[in-house]
Amino acid sequence: MPEPVRYHMADGVAVLTISNPPVNALSHAVRARLQSLAERAAIDGNVRAIVIAAEGRTFPAGADISEFGKPPAAPWLPEVCARIEAIEKPVVAAIHGTALGGGFEVALAAHARIADAKAAVGLPEVKLGILPGAGGTQRTPRLCGAGPALDLMLSGEPIHARAAERLGLVDVIAKDDLLKEAIAFARKLADAEVPPLRSSDRAPQEADPAAWAAEIAKRREALKDTPLHAPPRIVDCVEAVQLLPFEAGLDFERAAFEDLVGTPQSAALRHAFFAERRAGKLPELKGVPPIEVDHVGIVGAGLMGSGIAVACLNAGHRVTLIEKNIETLEAGVERIIDIYDRQVARKKMSVEDRDARIGRLAGREDLDALAEADLVIEAVVEDMDIKQRVFASLGRITAPGTVLATNTSYLDIDEIARGSGRPEDVMGLHFFSPAQVMRLVEVIPGRETAANVLATGFDFAGTLGKIAVRAGVTDGFIGNRVLAAYRQAAELTLLDGAAPEEIDAAMRAFGFPLGPFQVSDLAGLDIAWARRKRLAATRDPAARYVSIPDRLCEMGRLGRKAGYGWYAYPKNGDRLGEVDPAVAAVVDEERIFQGVTPRKFSGGEIQRRCLVAMANEGAKLLAEGIARRPSDIDVVMMHGFAFPRWHGGPMMWADQRGLLQVQKDLRRLAEDDPAAWAPAPVFGDLIKNGRGFDSLNG
């Protein structure tokens, strides 16, 4: 087995080359070998300087986070960084690709840094609920000051090499051959009369203690309402740079890191990280080549069709937008142009880039314009007859092998596919609105969808920068099935005594940006109403049915677009709405009709009812094979419905609460309403075997 770090001499310089594909993560083997070779170079009389480099596509892109939560294996990364920094000979980090997290901390421990012009550096630990734990919080501010260091660590976003150079985090930008120039730079440092200052020896740039304290106070004020644990601790660590000696600051940082890494919040954020990377991995598609997609046809120029068009144009695809009504087509094209014009106005896009994207767009009224498309996405109204007619035409017009996708939110993919005459070419691509912004796409194969068509769905979503999750055919797929269970739990809680604003406030307190009734107002109450009417014949007669939203729709209270829904919206742009006595009157009438004596609910009780309902529906989706993994459900709910990431999704939340407790919660609720709350059998199976949902994420 090849060594994860190699050693060779070049003109009196020891070059330590990290090789741990794919991203050179700083695993235990890499850490141990890197420290061993650094010590060898430190005592070798023939070595005048040292360069730390990496082969492959990147400098180390972080620590090996799969080791988090496991017993530590020496040497820890802080020990490796400390040993590198203590070497008497000049040490240069040669950065290419993305030096992130622990990788950048290694570079910060070196005495100087040279970077490829295309490189990027960053400290993204906050996204995992932790902080830089190998000296990053102490070295970074010494190089660039408190403000820039906090920007880097609190955002978790990487910065380009040129920006890092301006801040003092990178010393030199390589002009051509990074390694060759790094070796020359190291020799130059070795020849200098004065050795380079280590990060730990540098006085903070903001030497004025008052200015440093003001920056800390400003950040604390900005973070006073954050539900996240890591950002305030990062601020504490940067404050410690001014207050403590370097070694004591490292101890302070390490204690904060160890506190954070053991929290449920950090575990949830790490779960989210792995869940996103796991979602697109389907064993049955291994080795199946996707169809190459250049020309994309989109049928339907409404809000969804226009948004999908923008996503495709942004990815470099040619797009033909079809709408039989010329006024609707023109409105769709204008909507697309307006999206780009606003980006130009905000200086997020150049005029040239906007013009290039719009130049790849064609608007047509006739489906025949899609005869040579590689992929066609139907985004017309949610009506089975209309969709089947569209697919019947597409089946005749497009060439065999052209991928045909429907953007349906609820309807049966197999029924739609039958209309095409080519069901093997058909799948669902369910985008979330606004499609140019939302990162989630549910990829839904039908019974006869060909493997290369499904592979194309995942590959195409990737070209758009989306996270693709496989879902099976069922009404609402994964996301809308769980959303319906969430909404039902909220409505039953409303019927039993809570007010809409109390339920919404409780779920916002949990971390959702909007509560379930506010979301309904935003989406439009008529959408769920249409679904309820469509499914009325299949409704369980034993289940309690809450007709309050139906009555609101009958009153014309369709949400924000109508100015009234669960709330009133007298002010244009009002996000949360105003409590409306008319809604309370409808609720009271329904309670009287159903013989319900209302009771009080605490915020925590409201949260538990809604969350166990989501987890229970997720368990049913797993049992039915609609979702492959619990983590796929979590990804859908986080990216499609703003489930707070620091809770990891409903299935992760259930694991952290404990499946036995969730089952007890459901059984207690089922005593009064078994049709709505009976726990899925999978709870019993997992509990019996001492396992959680995470055990099903293989």
Image (spheres, helix red, strand yellow):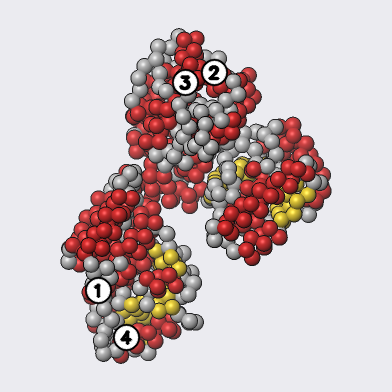
Q: Which residue is mark 2?
A: 547
Q: Residue 413 falls in which quadrant of the image?
A: top right
Amino acid under disc 4: Leu
Gap in Å between the C-alphas at discs 1 and 4? 17 Å
| Residue 186 drawn above or below residue 262 | below
Q: Nearer the viewer, mark 1 or mark 4?
A: 1
Q: Nearer the viewer, mark 3 or mark 1?
A: 3
Gap in Å between the C-alphas at discs 3 and 2? 18 Å
Estimate the x, y position of residue 596 in percent, counting from the top left.
43, 12
Q: Residue 667 falls in which quadrant of the image?
A: top left
The secondary structure type at the circle numbered 2 is loop
- Is disc 1 surrounded by few (<14), some (14 to 19) or many (20+) residues within 10 Å? few
Amino acid under disc 2: Ser
Q: Does label 3 or label 1 sit earlier along the sequence?
A: 1
Q: Does label 4 or label 2 sit earlier along the sequence?
A: 4
Residue 581 tag number: 3
Horizontal side of residue 480 vs 413, given as left or right: left
Residue 202 tag number: 1
- Is disc 3 surrounded by few (<14), some (14 to 19) or many (20+) residues within 10 Å? few
Q: Which residue is mark 4?
A: 189
